[in-house]
Amino acid sequence: MEKVVLSSRPYIRDFTKLELEKLIESNQFPRYRADQILDWVYQKNVRSFDAIKNLPKELIAFLKEKADLNRLELVSKHESFNHESIKFLTRTQDGLLCESVLIVQRGRPRSQVDFGDKLVLGAARAKGRNTVCVSTQLGCRIRCIFCASGKGKFGRNLTAGEIVEQISLIASEIKERVTNIVFMGMGEPLDNYENVIKALSILRAKWGYGLSGRRITVSTSGIPPKLRQFLKDTEGKVRLSVSLHSSNEETRSFLVPINKKYHLDELIKELDFIHQKLKREITFEYTLIGGINDTREEAEGTARLASRLGAKVNLIPYNPIQEMNLETPSKTKIEEFRKLLELKGVVVTVRQTAGRDINAACGQLRLDRTTGATEDVATSTS
Ligand code: SAH
């Protein structure tokens, strides 16, 4: 079969404002038209050039003939039983499959909002949130042993446009605004550095989505030489989450193989700098796996690291994947681990396992559709 490749036509979502202005001007249209196009694409979230209303028809014709607005095609969506998450499967122009997840947190009616010092939290909850979990790569090269994304062969990096288009597609499907973005889908964001930085600038720019960096979280397995540059390129404005998974060098190397190249020791030194000199907040993610990293020693080791770095810890009970026979710790065990951390003064959250029934929970997104329990999703468009 002939290999399908990405077209060389300009893809509008891959462009910064400056790049779009150049394209527009070099084709004899006035530069300000770029602002209008970007407003329709990001603020009004149009998914076809024809839906743009205030542009001359010559410009619309030019865009339709010469450029791409969309490069992701919806294949299926699947909603979890409790309606809290929807997994979207899309096809790229070169025929690969990409997964993204919407996590819905409905607000409570205003009348139920607490007062006093709970007001702020209450007000935020009253509004509700639509969080999109985006993929940055098709497959993953880090190959953490417990994560489905790294099983099977690596596809490719997603472009900046393909990363942000996942949000546009979901917003247009649900006909609501997306309020928060987490870079926690397939892939290691820092292993697709340039495209992720560009996607973040499109998300944050006034001419783009105009989202505050506080609403964006990038999760990384922790590649020390890239962390400082990342903070510089994002002005430290985006939330950083580091996948720790163990406070022990050997166990971490077993779980997150990149630890053999960049030792935990080196990662922590880099995080020390980020915490002390750059004064940035860090969150640790910690996938709890029964009998492997849920011991008292691990809780104490993690508490030591978290205290030293002023980091919060987000515990994620292991979500089963087909290839691995690992154990999800019991509720009691998870609570014990949480309490040990809290006793040392660490702020801990336990992530709800949103979307496990549709294989949309952390670590269950995969590229290879021919294996694994997610196969059924492709036929279950709702
Ligand atoms: N590559 C990035 C983003 C991964 S997804 C990173 O490593 O941080 C976000 C989180 O889900 C990571 O902490 C990841 O380790 C975790 N995760 C992966 N597979 C999981 C699984 N099967 N169960 C629970 N958490 C998992």
Image (cartoon, rainbow, N blue to C red):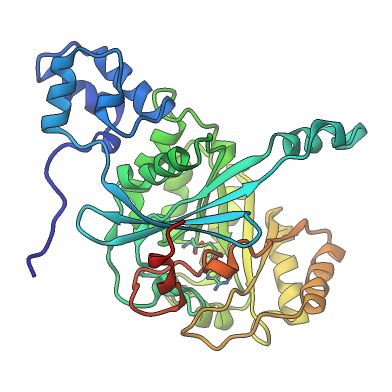
Viewer-proximal residue among 200 and 47:
47
**Residue 251, quarter of the rendered image:** bottom right
Left or right: 104 as drawn, with respect to 195: right
Q: Report the quarter where the N terminus lies.
A: bottom left
Left or right: 17 as drawn, with respect to 118: left
Q: Is residue 129 above or below residue 224?
A: above
Q: What percent of the width, then of the height, locates residue 237?
A: 54, 37
Q: What percent of the width, then of the height, locates residue 82?
A: 66, 59
Q: What percent of the width, then of the height, locates residue 342?
A: 83, 63
- Tell me if residue 359 can be seen: yes
Q: Is residue 187 above or below residue 20?
A: below
Viewer-proximal residue among 149 and 372:
372
**Residue 28, quarter of the rendered image:** top left
**Residue 225, quarter of the rendered image:** bottom left
The total of numbered circles placed on residues is 0
Q: Residue at x 35, y 70 (%)?
A: 141
Q: Residue at x 44, y 61 (%)?
A: 223
Left or right: 369 as drawn, with respect to 333: left
Q: Residue at x 70, y 69 (%)?
A: 302
Furthest residue in direction right, as rendered: 116
- Tell me if residue 265 can be seen: no
Q: Residue at x 79, y 79 (%)?
A: 333
